[in-house]
Amino acid sequence: MKIVVLGGAGHIGSRIVDEILRLSPSAHVTIADIDEIKGQQIAKQMGVDFVKADVTRSGELLEILKGKDVVVNAVGPFYRFGVQVLKTALTAGISYVDINDDYDSTLEGLALDRIAREKGVTAIIGMGATPGITNVLASIGAEKMDEVEEIGTYWIWTAIDPTMGNAIIEHFFHAITGNVKVFKNGNWVDEKALSEAEIFDFPEPIGTWEVAIVGHPEPITIPRYIKAKNVFNKGGIWPSELNEIAKVFAQLGLTGEGIVNLRGQQFKAIEIAVAIAMSLNQLVPAEELQNTLAKIYERLGDYSLMGMGLGVKIKGKKDEKGYVIEYGIAFKDSAQATALPCAVSALEIAKSEMPKGVFPPEAKVVDLNKVISEVKKISKIDCTEIRSYSI
């Protein structure tokens, strides 16, 4: 099988390549990335092919996709690049998997379903950790219920991973800006990002953190496949000091598309915010930085730099009684947690005949039990079930 990974030299993309090869050593993988030097280095280390690729050049990308069985898209932020790359894959007639984590580009991607069916293409979007694992667990939990009232998906993510690129930071700023979509009382509505904050308890050693409403794909896709009254996504980052700074940035409009004039040049506010975030280790006084990191290490240990917590809470009824199922996962390596479901899906699509169209994870195009089986090999999944009084 021939798989090309766009953004395969990046923070998550390189891990997707790694996971594909770990699961299927005989797979023929090509890294396609705009960073030629880094891409060639990683390709040489992994023993795969490399081709320089600018995903904004559709004609060139079409040439790269020729003869491939599956294209995996790891080029973020997806609200800027996701739909354009998906359209190119559909034009090429090649099966597609991505880790799209932006709510607006998810809506645009789902709108391409008819074209995908006409082209005979299977496209799975949002098959990472969140969205991805969260959707899968929501689906598995919902199947145990007679009626689903509410699905909440939660995440807390490291903001101090030294391997992290600017795309994930830009995604986070985009997700906490302005109004975002949630599913409330049976309808999609706009909700202010960072509203409805709560303290959520993730499995140890992650523990309790503040999370709030963010713009994410789960509330966009889950109600299309699971009948529920309410669906939302809440997230945050650690250290909490950086989470607070991000909230202030968002409140001041510094994570939006407004224009900033600087020395005769114009920049979007979000570009400035991302640049500041990427430079914090140089900007923050050394003593302050050391104190912050020391507190995180004391609390999270080996999970500090690259960890992540996921949670899914499903509320509903079973046998006319209230029923709550809650899943939780503490990952030591957030990049692997994001890459693994995508790699599993890419390999499944390459090997099997799948329905045609654009699908989120909970559409069950890929065997969800297989995805969870692989996830369990890298981290324990906690599950709590509570049955209450008759309703």
Image (spheres, grey):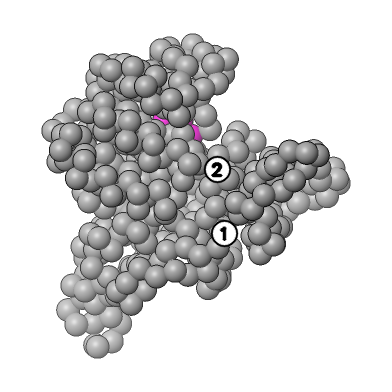
Q: Which residue corresponds to mark 1?
A: 177
364 up-or-down from 98: above or below: below
Image quadrant holding the N terminus, namely top left
307 up-or-down from 1: above or below: below
| Residue at image coords 60%, 51% | 257
Q: Which residue corresponds to mark 2?
A: 168
Query: Taking the image as drawn, is residue 82 in sight?
Result: yes
On whether residue 284 falls in the magenta region, the answer is: no
Q: Magenta-highlighted stretch: main secondary structure?
A: helix
Q: Are marks 2 and 1 in contact (CB under 8 Å)?
A: no
Side of 272 where 91 appears, left or right = left
Side of 111 where 171 appears, left or right = right
In the image, residue 247 lies at what x, y percent?
A: 65, 61
Query: Could you say which disc has been placed on residue 18 in the image?
Result: none
Question: Mark 2 or 1, which is nearer the eye?
Answer: 1
Q: Quadrant of residue 118?
A: top left
Q: Secondary structure at mark 2?
A: helix
Q: Quadrant of residue 306?
A: top right
Distance, label 2 to label 1, CA atoms, is 14 Å
Q: Secondary structure at mark 1?
A: loop
Side of 84 where 369 appears, left or right = left
